[in-house]
Image: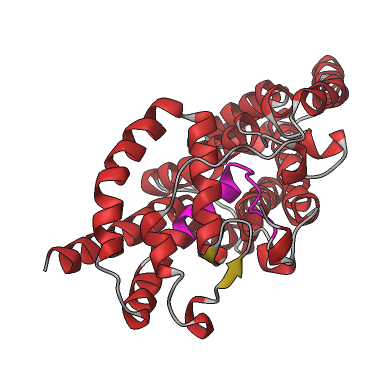
Amino acid sequence: MELLIMEIYYFFYGIFIILTILSPILLQIGCFPILIRYGIRYIKGKVFSLSQSILLLFGLVIIPALMFFLASVFTARYRWEKGDHWFYYIHDQWAGLVLMPVYLIASISLARSLFDEEYMATSRANYIMVATLAAIAAWYTYATLALNLTKTDMTDIPILAIVPAAACLNYLAFLFIVKKMGRLQSINPLFAFIWFSTLIASLIAKYPLAKSIYQNISEEIPRDYGDCFVVSAAAKGHPCIVQSWMNSTIGKPVNRQWYIFKRFEAMLALNFPQIHRILRRIYNRLGPFIAKQIRYPWQADIVYLLLKPMEWAVFIVLKLTNSRIMRISHPTSVQ
C-alpha cells in the first residue's frame, strides 16, 4: 500500500513538474494568435486590451528574458558534453551573459510599447531593438537545433528549440503590427551608431570569453554521484519494454532512463551541491526500501512507466540548462 501511494505521488509530481516547465513554452505559443489577429486586420484605435498587454508582457518580455538567462548561466562540466571546439560554448556563463544588457534594454522598450500605443506606432528605435531580439532568438534557435546535436545520437534532438523559435515568431509578428500602423519616425543617427556599436562589440567580446571557458573545462567525465536505486530496479524489467542492456563496466542492466537521471544528478551536484546533498540523503533512505519491493520483471515494467513523466521533466530541465545526455549509441562505450 505504501509503495502504491509513493508511486501515485511520484506520478502526479512528475506531471506537475512537466506542466511547470512547459508553461513558459505554452505561454509563448499562446501569444502568437493574439499578435496574428491584430496583425491581419487594419489597426485603428486601441490595439491591445489591458489583459492582453499583460499576457504579451509575460510571453514576449519576461519569459524570453528568463530563458535567455538560464541558457547563459549553465555550462557543460566537461568538453565531451557539447563538442571539441570553443565555439560551442559561446552561450555559456559570461560568454552568454555578455548580450544580456542589450537584451534587457530592448525588452524594456518592448514592454513600454505594449502599454503605450503612441510609442509603439512612432518609435523606429523600438522597432530596431525588437528586430534585434528577433535576430538573437533566431540565432538561439539555430544553435539549439544544430550546435547541441554535436556528439549525440538522433534520439537526443533538442526539442526545446521551440522556446527561442516561438519568441522569434512573436517578435516578427509584433514588428508586422508596428509596421502596419505606418507612423514610424526617423531614427536618431546617434542612437543607431551607439546601438549597433554596442551590439557588435558584445558579439566580438563573446569569442575570447568562450575560449576562456573552453580552456577551463575538464576533459574528464565527473565521478559517479551514487546509485539510482529505483531507476536501477526499473531497468530490470522486460528489455522489450524498459529497453535495457547489460553494462559490463558496472555489472548491471541500464537503459536511457537510467542515464538521464544520472546526468541530472551530476548537474545538480555540480551546480547546487547543498541541495543535492539534502536530496541525496533523503533518497538514500527511501530509495533502497522502494527498490526492494520491485521483485518481478512486471513490477519493474510498471515502475519504469510510472517514472516516464519524471524522466521527461528531467530531460527538459537538462535541455534548458544545456546539459548533455550521455551518449548511448554504443552502450559498451558508456562509462
Residue 225 percent location from the top left of the image? 49, 40
Residue 306 lies in what quarter of the image? bottom left
Instruction: Tell me, yes or no, if residue 144 can be seen here.
Output: yes
Residue 71 lies in what quarter of the image? top right
Decide: is 300 above or below 91.
below
Decide: is 35 above or below 265.
below
Quadrant in which the N terminus is drawn: bottom left
Q: Foreground: 194 or 70?
A: 70
Q: Is residue 326 left or right of residue 63?
A: right
Instruction: Tell me, yes or no, if residue 29 can be seen here.
Output: no
Q: How many marks?
A: 0
Residue sitting at 74 percent across and 30 percent down?
218
Decide: is 116 above or below 174.
above
Q: Is residue 146 left or right of residue 228?
A: right
Q: Foreground: 111 or 82?
A: 82
Decide: is 118 above or below 142.
above
Q: Is residue 124 left or right of residue 201?
A: left
Residue 291 percent location from the top left of the image? 31, 61
Residue 126 percent location from the top left of the image? 68, 31
Residue sitting at 60 percent across and 52 percent down?
163
Residue 327 percent location from the top left of the image? 70, 58
Q: Is residue 130 magenta?
A: no
Q: Foreground: 24 or 30?
A: 24
Residue stretch rendered in magenta on the structure: 312-327
Residue sitting at 75 percent across and 31 percent down?
185
Residue sitting at 49 percent across and 53 percent down?
261
Q: Residue furthest left?
A: 1
